[in-house]
Each structure stands twice: as structure tokens, then as C-alpha cells.
Amino acid sequence: MRENENMQRLQSQRCYLYGPFADTILMLRPFMKSPARFSAVFVLVFLLFGAFVCTRFLNSPILVDTSAEEPIITTRTSQKHPLNCTAYDLTRTCPSNYPTTTSHSEQDPDRPLPPTCPEYFRWIHEDLGPWAHTGITGDMVQQAKRTANFKLVIVNGKAYVEKYQKSFQTRDVFTMWGILQLLRRYPGQVPDLELMFDCVDWPVISSNDYSGPNATAPPPLFRYCGDDNSLDIVFPDWSFWGWAEINIKPWEVLLKDLEEGNKRKRWIDRAPYAYWKGNPSVAATRQDLLKCNVSDQQDWNARVYAQDWLRESSEGYKQSDLASQCVDRYKIYIEGSAWSVSDKYILACDSVTLIVKPRYYDFFTRSLMPVHHYWPIKDDDKCRSIKFAVDWGNSHKQKAQAIGKAASKLIQEELRMDYVYDYMFHLLNEYAKLLQFKPTIPRKAIELCSEAMACQAQGTEKKFMMESLVKSPAVSNPCTMPPPYGPASLFAVLRRNANSIKQVETWENKYWENQSKQS
């Protein structure tokens, strides 16, 4: 979503809590098995006493050392590996005490069994399909440098970054932060790899340039969205860890707020209109949407508002609290200059999401089913399409409520941060399997760790980093990947979606035919 970037260009005439990493009992087992000598007993008693004291402290609320300029933050879930900014400021080096291997044992009866990953994980195989037979060479990766913002290298569980160009706002910062949290969540489980990341919205690896009998393999380039004409590899966007510039909280925090916001007003008691608020200046299709607003001459059942982010910033974002916007029966999702991060916020609202025919997709939206998770809206006849959708929903209230509920359920259950991290994990693992070379640390790269980013951050950036910090390794392995689509199963999914959209268009055409007869 590039609406803020374009806005600034116009202004200037240019451009879950995770379980603690508890291995205390494992550490004590050698003492328990040792001979009963006096010295061993003394050590054991001393350790047990220390564990008792520590436990009393761990059960206390969050402790913050306010006397230090950069506080050491300790919580019940981070007793082993909090950020120690005081130590980092002294050495300016990344700490070596965080685990680089997992403590899980496949034979551990108390280890939770991982669930099966959601359906949208199957698209990982599709996104990596262009390299399934050729593999990925170092030269291919280097070819993707042309538009990349940075190169990420992971070696022995540590991250190294070579920066090429600054992204718009802090997209690159929070993308790197998210990857670091993945390494903290699954220490030692992310394989060595090397990749290029482009933080701009629009896909740039055109499939037409790499088709035909003599075509070469495309350069692998990671970004936030794709379309049917591109081969860019889709990755979760930066806003899952917070969007500091417009005060959008990290997803784990915001998702709970949205769940509570849904409870404030029942669907049947909500305004019976379609709501949209955003920056219309970034795309002609959004400017076209403004024509659907209510006027003295016509009511298309739409209530659309232009968002002034400069004013919002100066007034403390009082009118842009996302959890307070779940008060309409219908909410409109429309792309900006490309895909928009607002899709997840809109879908989480229990409202019926009216999706104006999109061109782009992100990593999870390909699992959305028309008429089940959302209602399709024509791009070339928006106003009439929106009016029909709202009239249909208000006449079929139970069915409309079911659509809104199915979408918010998908977001709450299948897009929680556990699965966002697992998607990243499986995508990077499958990608690393394709590499035909051994990743090495670039000469100009810097080691990246959570301390190097959060301890030096300020204001909202630091706040969001601390809120989204993974405080200890996960207590279970990542979810189990579903199998890839076969040609027949993928065709069935695409055909089902196309047929559902066609059915809505048929209903809509009949609706307007009847309206014409009545007039």
C-alpha cells in the first residue's frame, strides 16, 4: 500500500504470548543421577533454592528498570532472553546467549503436536514453482538486486543484511525485524539462505519475460504482493509488526482489539451501508469510488470518506482507530496503487467485505472464497454493484451475517501471528532447498539482531518493536505443511471462485433489469 508515499509526493510536489523456554528440569537431571556425595547434595539444594526464589520473581508483573537510560525488560515469558539494551550499549555487538538450536525432542511426550497449516500455505509451492526444476543459483539471486532494498543472508541461525536503498518509511526496518523474530521463535531451524527483498508494492518480475522454450529461469525476488502476470515471491508485509508512521499497532495486539471491537455492536444493529475510508489520491479506481458516495441525487448505499493522514497525525490519530470502525454492516476493500495492507483489518470486522475486483494478492488472500468470505464488486461499475450488494445483504440478513463471520473467523483463527511466522518459516525453508550454492556472509553485510534494532529505536518504532518481540522460542514445531496443489485440484479452486463471481454477476444483472422495468 503506497498511499502515504504518494500523498507525501503530492504534498512536496515529488514524491501469542509464547510458552517459556523452560529447560531447568533438563539441567537438573545430571545432578539427580549423580552419586549422593555431600558436595553434590549441597549444589542441588542451592539450585533448588535459587529456582524457588527465581520462580517467585517470575510470577511477578512486568519489571522495568526505570533507573537505566535504556531499560532491561523482563516478563514471565521472557525470563531467559529479554532484550538487554544496557549490555548492548556497552559492546555494540549482538548477544551470544540466545539459543541457536531448538530444545525440542521428537520423543518428548509433553511437546504439543503441531497443527496442519491453513490452506493458503499451499500457494508456497506455486510461488516457488518457477525454480522447481532449475534450482536457484547465486547469479540468479544477484540478478534480483536491480530493484531490491536489501539482501538478507542467514548463516548458522544468525541474520546478516546488506542494504542497497532505503525503503519508503520503515517498511524495510519492520520487515527485517519480523525476520529476526522468526529466528528467535525457531532458533536453529531456519536454514542457511540468501535472498533479495524489494519493499515496493508493484511486482516487477514479469512472467512474459521468462516464458517460451528458450526462456531462462527468473531472478527470485521477495516482496509483499503479486499478480497473475508476475513471478515475485510473496512474503508477509511489514505491518504485521506495526506501521509506526500511521500508528497501526503490531498485528498480535491489533487482532485482539479488533475482536473486542466486533463485540461493541451486533451486525443487525450496525449501519446498513457500505463504508470505506482511505486515501483516494493514490489510484484512479479509488477516485472513481468517491462517485458512489451519497448525494442529493442518488444514494448508492455507500458512505465513503477521504482520509487525511497529515491531519490525523497532527491530531493523534483519533479518527483512525481500526477497532472502532466495525460499526457498519458492509465494508469496502479497494486497492490503491497496488494491494493494500488494509485487507486484513477490513476482513476482521464481522462486516460483509465488499471487494472491488482486485488485481493483486498477498500471501493469504488467495484462500478467500467469493460469497463465502466476501462479496465481489465490479471494478467497471462500482456504484451499481455496491448498491446491489447492500440491498441483497439487507434482504438476506442471515446469509450476509454468515459471510462476514466466515471472514473474521478466518482472520482470527488462520491469520494469527503463530501462522504468520509459520508461513515465513515454511516459505524460507522451501526456498532454501532450491539454492544451488552455499550462502556466505557478504563483505559489506552487517549482523542484525533484535538488540541492534530495538535498543537504538525511538518513540513509536521502539514501542511497536517491544510489543512484537518474540521473548522465547516456541514450545512446539511449526505447523505441518499441506501438500501442493495438483493441476486438477488447483483448477477446481480457480473454477469454483470464477463460478461464484459469475453467479453474483447474474443476480446483479437480473436485479437491475427488474429495477428498469419498475421505473
Image (cartoon, grey):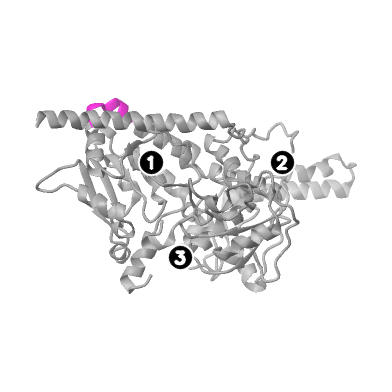
**Quadrant location of residue 271?**
top left
Q: Is residue 10 left or right of residue 518?
A: right
Q: Tell me which segment is drawn in magenta.
A: 392-401
**Quadrant location of residue 395?**
top left
Q: Amino acid at mark 1?
A: Leu
Q: Is residue 479 visible?
A: yes
Q: Is residue 210 left or right of residue 38?
A: left
Secondary structure mostly taken by the magenta-highlighted segment of the chain: helix
User: Residue drawn at (72%, 41%), measured in percent from left and top?
Assistant: 104
Mark 3: few, some, or many residues within 10 Å (few <14, many ≥20)? few
Eyeballing the image, is 289 above or below 476? Answer: below
The residue furthest front is 213
Residue 68 point in image, percent of width and height: 55, 69
Residue 505 shown in magenta: no
As measured in the structure, the alpha-carbon distance from the residue carrying label 2 to the one carrying label 3 is 39 Å
* Residue denoted by label 2: 104
The disc, 3 or 1, on the residue closer to the chain's N-terminal end is 3
Residue 37 point in image, percent of width and height: 90, 45
Eyeballing the image, is 428 above or below 311? Answer: above
As measured in the structure, the alpha-carbon distance from the residue carrying label 3 to the one carrying label 1 is 26 Å
The disc, 2 or 1, on the residue closer to the chain's N-terminal end is 2
Mark 2: few, some, or many residues within 10 Å (few <14, many ≥20)? some
Front residue of this view, candidates 125 and 48: 125
